[in-house]
Image (cartoon, rainbow, N blue to C red):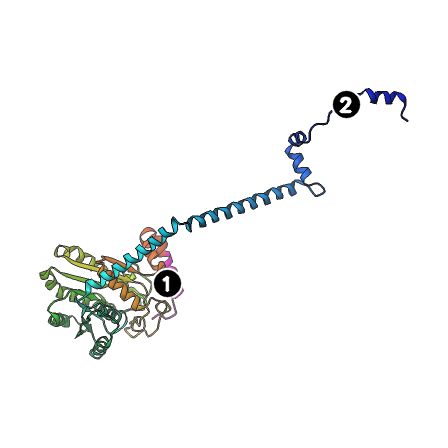
Amino acid sequence: MEGPHLGWWTQFRPPHPAPPTCALRRARPARMRILTAGRGKNTSPERREDGIDSFSMASAATRKSLLRARVMDLVTSTAILPLLLGCVGVFSLFKLLQWLRARAYVRNAVVVVTGATSGLGRECARVFHAAGAKLVLCGRNAEALEELTRELAASQATKVQTHKPCTVTFDLAEPGAIVGAAAEILQCFGYVDVLINNAGISYRGTVVDTSLDVDKRVMETNYFGPVALTKALLPSMIRRRQGHVVAISSIQGKISVPFRSAYAASKHATQAFFDCLRAEVEQHDIEVTVVSPGYIHTNLSLNAVTADGSKYGVMDETTARGRSPSQVARDVLAAVGKKKKDVVLADAAPSLAVYLRTLAPRLFFSLMASRARKERKPKHC
């Protein structure tokens, strides 16, 4: 019950001015703002942390989107896009000039190709013939050489003046035939500008089961034959102070793969010999190029010899997935035209293995041992 005394008090009580709304909003603590923001909802600490994290993630995503948009605007701006297109154009022009220079280097040059009847040698014959080289094709099969000569003579796929190839039949594995073959090669055009030592034979087998005769056979074809032919033709190059010796080695001339012992040994020897030759003949202005391809899709594994000397007769999976011989032949032409010293034409994994062999030998040997265990069969041949 409200009496007169209470009414008198309410009449004379000094009024309390209400604070402005903006001041209340400023004075409200941050925690209170968080609590009042979730009015009517669950505002537990976990829920508040989830809300803050979601806000942070959304902000990060927004920043990334803005940054991506700015980068795209920068790339497509009138200042950057022409610069990028110009760089691409300059690089393409540079590659074109290199290719034209390589073709000009071998135009009208006398180029000797061994093992020209099949595989990489046959493709090298086609590529160098199209570039205008005067070819001397060498191989063991006279009929196959004549067939290739007719094919090249009938080809009209180039505007460059081409020349009818000359053929010389001999076997690199027969040391007594090489001196006479070299004299016959020089009789074709009187001199040799480029010698491409391409002929070779592959091998599959275990070290324990392989006879020494097989090792010698592989070395005769892959190492002693090219060395003998190079030595027979080198004096004429030195007299002219002009010449280019090319050795088609292998990636296995730099690393060794299980069950390829004889082949890897011959290619290691090839690499070492022509590296020494390069240093010795530089004073005579003679170039030496060692090309080390990876797997090439040819019949090399089909024609490989086994531990007992028989024919392997199997297309390896790695060989079947290898590079096209025509592409490798074009790379050989480019390497010759650029006068490169040492060229590796292999995929990423074999190329990486070359560096791994030097930088992390323990890891490399472990990987090769693991590969040997996987490839081992009850009777590997």
Look at the magenta stretch and give its main secondary structure.
helix
Q: Name the residue tied to disc 2.
A: 15
Task: Give the x, y percent position of residue 124.
Answer: 24, 68
Query: Hey, which quadrant is residue 120 in on the image?
Result: bottom left
Q: Name the residue tied to disc 1.
A: 372
Q: Spot the residue most to the front.
A: 78
Task: Read off the magenta span.
Answer: 366-381
Residue 98 vertical placement versus 378 (above, below): above
Q: Earlier in the sequence, mark 2 or mark 1?
A: 2
Task: Give the x, y percent position of residue 328.
Answer: 29, 65
Which is more toward the observer, 100 or 123? 100
Q: Residue at x 12, y 72 (%)?
A: 188
Horizontal side of 190 relative to 260 (left or right) equals left
Q: Is residue 377 rendered magenta in the image?
A: yes
SS at mark 2? loop
Query: Hey, which quadrant is residue 230 in on the image?
Result: bottom left
SS at mark 1? helix
Q: Spot the residue most to the bottom.
A: 143
Q: Residue at x 65, y 40 (%)?
A: 45
Residue contact at pointers 2 and 1, CB within 8 angstroms: no
Q: Rate crowding at label 2 as few (under 14), some (14 to 19) or many (20 or more) other CA atoms within 10 Å.
A: few
Which is more toward the observer, 169 or 216? 169
Disc number lying in front (2 or 1): 2
Horizontal side of 49 relative to 89 (left or right) equals right
